[in-house]
Amino acid sequence: MVVFPIFSSTVAGVRGVSRELREVGLVEGATWWQRLRYIEVPLALPILFSGFRTSLAYATTGAVVGEFIGSRFGLGAMINVARGFLDTPLIFVALVCLGLMTLLFSTVVLSLERLLVSWQD
């Protein structure tokens, strides 16, 4: 579920690097690795992190749906058990925990983005 958003944002980010910057790297004698490390990856990072943030929502949703289907443990299984017992407060507790987990993961990715892409406003 998370591969496609990350892959598509990576491809879009790398293709979005201007041709002139790549040619400057070639003219200066940079190897393929140096061009990738110093030109293409840093300029593709903002779009790549956009794909990471999109994938976070898919990852948590996919994990819970997987637990709905075939697990005895986890938030999805807890929601299934609570639904069977008509325990609405437990369902809300599981949903709040899911929201907090997603918020925590999103905060980690946002902090990592601010650290790695500090040069961008």
Image (spheres, grey):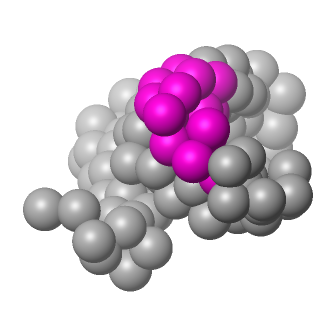
Residue furthest to the front in view is 27
Q: Is residue 16 above or below residue 21?
A: above
Find the residue positioned furthest to the left: 121
Residue that appears at 32% across and 51% down: 99
| Residue 9, quarter of picture | top right
Most foreground residue, 119 or 81: 119
Q: Residue at x 29, y 75 (%)?
A: 118
The stretch drawn in magenta includes residue 19: yes
Q: Is residue 111 above or below residue 25?
A: below
Query: Is 119 part of what is drawn in magenta?
Result: no
Residue plotted at (13% across, 62% down): 121
Q: x, y percentage for residue 41?
A: 61, 53
> Position of 30 compared to 28: left or right?
right
Which stretch is magenta? 9-25
Give the percent coordinates (x, y) of residue 107: 33, 68
Answer with left or right where residue 78 lies relative to residue 47: right
Q: Is residue 113 visible?
A: yes
Majority secondary structure in the magenta region = helix
Above or below — where is 64 with respect to 40? above
Q: Residue at x 58, y 55 (%)?
A: 39
Query: Relative to 9, is 121 above or below?
Result: below
Q: Can residue 90 be seen by looking at this rendering? A: no
Coordinates of residue 111 in the picture (x, y in percent): 35, 75
